Image: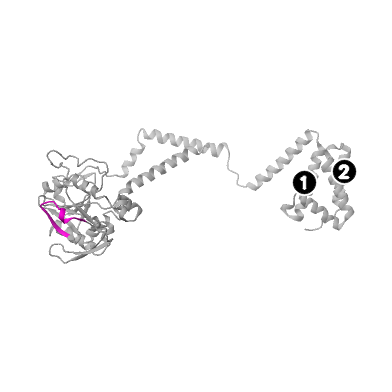
Amino acid sequence: MRSSPPLLFLGLLLVLAALAIFALSRGSDYDRSPLGNKGLELWLQAKGIPVVRSDPHIARARSEISLRIIPLSIRQGEAAAPGANKETGEIGPESPVRESNRYALPTLIILPKWRGSVSTEGVASKSGLVDLSDISGELGRIGYSDFGFARSEAGFEEAEMRVKTGQPIKIALYQAQTFERSSLPGRWEELAGTPLGALLLRSQDDPNVYLLSDPDLLNNHGLALADNASFAVSLVTLLRKAGETRPVYLDTSGEPLDGKKSIDEGRSYERSASDLKRFFAYPLSVIWGTLILVAAICFWRGAYRFGPPRREASANIEMSKTAAIEATARLLRLSGNDGRMTGQFVLHLLADKAQLFFGPGGGNEAGIERLFKRLARRDQAAAQALHSSAQALIDRGHLMTRADLHRNLEIFRKSLGSVDLGSR
């Protein structure tokens, strides 16, 4: 029980480390899941398009980015867009729509399609689709409404799409999600679509805002299908305009942009070897001194007070047996019970002889009986005399007088000496 506090402290440290690792890896786990956008980031960078991700510690400046991509997610139980004025219909200053107009920044808003359970379970089915009413609610948060949606009932659907005047690109979507053309609000322009409906829309009132109905065209899962990866590069190239060198901003946090320059709200430190001295400055020096003193006392208590550890365990066992036998004999003599001691001596001697013949398992009553039978086959009379004297000492030794005890013990000794034990 003395080692319990150190073990509990070590267990607590391990739990805290596991929690820290889990907390740091949760975001990256989703980015690399089928619904994440890590694949889009790596794919665009491989095609020469730089990408920066959102960071809660950095307010990204509009002048540093060429295109903002915002994957919407379903936020359950929240009110309509924070900062929105319901009476005037104005959108709050943190709205990506308003920021796109203020900074003339092309902004691609990707609508949600799958629930989070699809990422954890790894199975995409109709039960994993987000309700269309929830998607409408997300659009309402950023100031858009009255959109109708259509979903394919044929599972996978393939189509050829053309981005501006480029070559047609073959795409494939599972449970394709599109805007219904018949329900599009006024002054919305379709830039790409399938026979089922429109996939990419542009607002004429907000010319820098683009809506993509199906996220599978840009997420990790969808980029591996057909030529969806080529479509993603063509789409990003079109929206950020030709000749752009500034990076694409993949915004997964929804933090507002800064109008001037990036502001790093975190703090960076430069470490050197001299900083190690601070661990030994007062009052930490007192703590270190106390720990060293406690360690020295523990070492003295274990090494000096109790002596060095014994390495030969077998010798200790033999010493313990001898000490136990001597203590038992002394107690028997002090109690005046020499007969019982003699009976035990005879029984143990016969058990040792039986072990010589029949091995370690023969040192019991059955082994002693086998020993007498073996001796009887060689010399019936000697074996019978030995058996009678031994049995008398074992059974009635504690009842005998001192003279009878010595007489029977002498008979036993002579009988044992006259018996030819032979070899095993």
> Is 300 a magenta residue?
no
The kind of residue on which mark 1 rests is His
Can you tell which mark lies on residue 348?
Answer: 1
Q: Is residue 305 left or right of residue 338?
A: left
Q: Nearer the viewer, residue 44 or 295?
A: 44
Q: Nearer the viewer, residue 259 or 411?
A: 259
Answer whether residue 184 is magenta in the image.
yes
Find residue 91 and report its horizontal and vertical position in percent: 14, 42
From which residue to which does the magenta span run? 178-192
Q: Nearer the viewer, residue 186 or 121?
A: 186
Image position of 323 with respect to 375: above or below = above
Q: Quadrant of residue 161?
A: bottom left
The picture places residue 276, in percent across and down from the top left corner, at 34, 41
Closer to us: 91 or 129:
129
Residue named by callout 2: 408
**Which quadrant holds the C terminus?**
bottom right
Q: Residue at x 58, y 39 (%)?
A: 307
Residue drawn at the location 16% of the way across and 48% of the way down: 146
Labels 1 & 2 near each other (Cβ < 8 A): no
